[in-house]
Amino acid sequence: MQNKIADLRRDYQFRTLNITDVSPAPFVQFKNWFDEALKVAEETKGFEANAMTLCTATSEGKPSARIVLLKGFDEKGFIFYTNYESKKGQQIEANPNVALVFHWHGLERQIRIEGQAHRVEPSMSDKYYNSRPRKSRLGAWASPQSQTIEHRELLEQNMEQLQAKYSEEKPIPRPPHWGGYRVAPSLIEFWQGRSSRLHDRIVYEKKNDSWEIRRVAP
């Protein structure tokens, strides 16, 4: 098995990425790539274009990573929603420095983001929460995210009780422990796979109020 894994390799030849081709604005460049990934995802049904790895760390620097879903972005940053009392929520509160990674295998592309995460405005969390399907809203109440539970039945019992409490007509308030974070980036790297592992990497790094663009070696 060890030898078989070591022999796995792929020669990337799909696209190129030149510094003269990218937008001077990183969020415009992100939108261009994200729109293309979204189109491919919709055509193939093979992946979620908005799935991203979120890496957080404790105040001592011990890292932790998981997949979350991007739910919006603008020039202020990248937005996702979660339980504030979850492991990632607690780590963000203790250490706001985080990293995001998008990997679109079919396009041989990756985007890596470094920045700080802070809670979005309550009104924004309310708006997104109220747009979710009813059971997803109830799920935010039913699950004590990241806490140890003895069995799955506890979640199912919580959900049954909540469904009885909130009828179809009754509004479901957003839990105070649930809402959004915005990752304000200080660095965004666009990676395009190339042949012979000589990949293209274009980095945007924030310097004061402007973005410095440079190519880095793979």
Image (cartoon, grey):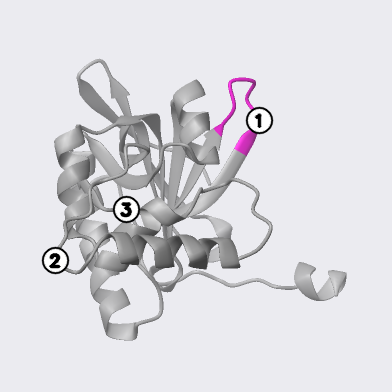
The residue that mark 2 highlights is: 169
Which residue is at 40% across, 80% downward? 46
Label 3 amino acid? Leu
Q: Earlier in the sequence, mark 1 or mark 2?
A: 1
Label 2 amino acid? Glu
Disc 2 is placed on an element classified as loop
Task: State the predominant SS element of the stretch in magenta.
Answer: loop
Q: Say if 14 sits above or below 184 in the image.
A: below
Q: CA distance from mark 1 to mark 3?
A: 24 Å
Q: Earlier in the sequence, mark 2 or mark 3?
A: 3
The residue that mark 3 highlights is: 70
Disc 3 is placed on an element classified as loop
Badge 3: residue crowd in 10 Å (few <14, some 14–19, many ≥20):
some
Q: Does 134 sit left or right of 45 as displayed?
A: left
The residue that mark 1 highlights is: 62
In the image, the segment drawn in magenta is 57-63
